[in-house]
Image (cartoon, rainbow, N blue to C red):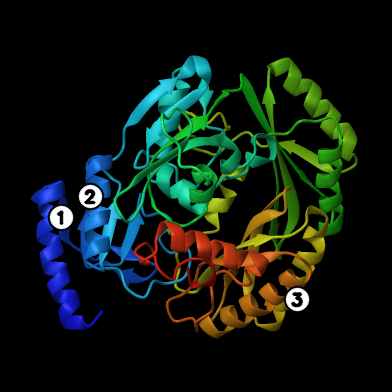
Amino acid sequence: MPPDLLVNAMLSTEEALRAIAGAQHVRPGGEGDFVGGVRGQLVVEPGNEQELSAVLRTASEAGLRVAPRGGGTKVSWGNSPARVDLIVSTARLDKIIEHAWADLTVTVEAGCTMQNLQERLAQHGQRLALDAMWSARATVGGVLSTNDSGVLRLRFGGLRDLIIGVTLALPDGTLARSGGKVVKNVAGYDLPKLATGALGTLGVIARATFRLHALPLDTRTLSISGADLGEMQHCMLAIEDSQLAPSALQLRLSPNAPAEVDVLLEGTPAGLAAQEAHLRELVEPLHVVENRGVENPAPENPAGRNNAAAWTARERLWSFASSEAVAKVSVLPAEIATAFDTVRRVASVHRAQWSAVMQATGLGLLRLDGTAEALHASLEELRAALERGGGSLAILRRPADMPPLDAWGDAGDSLALMRAIKQQLDPRGTLNGGRFVGGI
């Protein structure tokens, strides 16, 4: 759109948005209103689903480019958009609509924070069995859009296994409902699974329905050390193949410290004692210690996860420094040691520092520190190596001065299908254009 036409469209749209959401809920973009490094020109906060759908229809008809935003904890993920005319904030869509505790389900609006949701569920001894990063700020919609399942997916599955219904506001103003407790479904699409991990490119999540699990009576975290990386990988595989039922299992890695495996056990006190004894026997002669918690633990633990410092290791990879890059890596569980031999070699060649947290499922986060050129070269080389082995590397954060590099890498044979779905649900390219795989 030519600049003069865009200015006119923005001015007329701003007035329309004020009429929809209220003048006090529409404002110019400020210093904190960046998405993928691009500043939003306008910010609107609709107060309900009807306002949300009207906002999207108005923006789409005016030819504006829209970026949804929840708590803003993951707005750097993905590629930078070409432009952001309008940020649609879900801050006012923060209600827990229905907690059917007897049926183990909850329906919640997209702007509700994970911490608030878990605290409400804990009042009935239940939880949404995921541990998203920065839960005090991260919202339900943002966690779904980025597919931040966390370490509990080993036992309870990922977000696509936990979500059973969604209401999605499409750019043409349609409120599409699928799954869960709905009267009318959208034929042909499994919207809950499509919306999960789509980075807000198909529609704006308005509400979601999840299946729940009971809070455990007790938890215990055990950390295992005393071997090289290959032996620690075999340790994780042995635990998975045993009669133990860990809720989380992760490997913490850095070049300056021994690798450590963390095991989260949940159950009754007697059951935990039996599981711990079995674990110690299984991994003997490796060193096993109980990780009792951090110095200043939170007063409540609504997700049922204890306060062991091990389970905040993913968050500690992020310092938001100017010399830092963070990537999500995926490898076969049996190839973790091989993959990180490659990480060690590549980082050494390019004089980059690294650390990582890998889940037993083969998913994890890798942090690299160094010059912009070193990070670019390291990420490019690591991605090529991982993709040759059937893995992947997606860049979640990078320094502003790093040379351009696609965030996602090779999309494989799925790209044509993804583009077809994008064309069907967002034919004008209104939502988060360019941020997702293949420039979607």
Q: Where is residue 328 in the image (x, y as percent from the top left)?
A: 60, 61
Disc 2 marks which amino acid?
Answer: Ala
> Badge 3 is on which residue?
345
Q: Position of residue 281 (x, y in %)?
A: 89, 32
Answer above or below: position of 107 versus 369.
above
The tag earlier along the polypeptide, 3 or 1, is: 1
Q: Is the residue marked by circle 3 packed among few (<14), some (14-19), or many (20+) residues within 10 Å?
A: few
Answer above or below: position of 140 versus 104.
below
> In whole angstroms, how far apart are the C-alphas of marks 2 and 3?
53 Å
Image quadrant of residue 117?
top left
The tag earlier along the polypeptide, 2 or 1, is: 1
Check if mark 3's residue and mark 1's residue have beta carbons within 8 Å.
Answer: no
Which is closer to the viewer, label 2 or label 1?
2
Q: In this view, does 246 lie to the left or right of 210?
A: right
> Badge 1 is on which residue?
17
Residue 138 appears in the picture as rendered: no
Answer above or below: position of 242 versus 15.
above
> Badge 2 is on which residue?
54
Mark 1 secondary-structure assignment: helix
Between residue 74 and residue 96, name the one nearer to us. 96
Residue at the image position 25 percent from the left and 39 percent from the top = 48
Q: Where is residue 157 in the image (x, y as percent from the top left)?
A: 64, 39
> In whole angstroms, how far apart are the C-alphas of marks 2 and 1?
9 Å
The tag earlier along the polypeptide, 2 or 3, is: 2
Disc 3 marks which amino acid?
Answer: Arg
Answer above or below: position of 328 versus 215.
below
Residue 125 appears in the picture as rendered: yes
Picture disc at residue 225: none
Residue at the image position 79 percent from the left and 26 percent from the top = 275
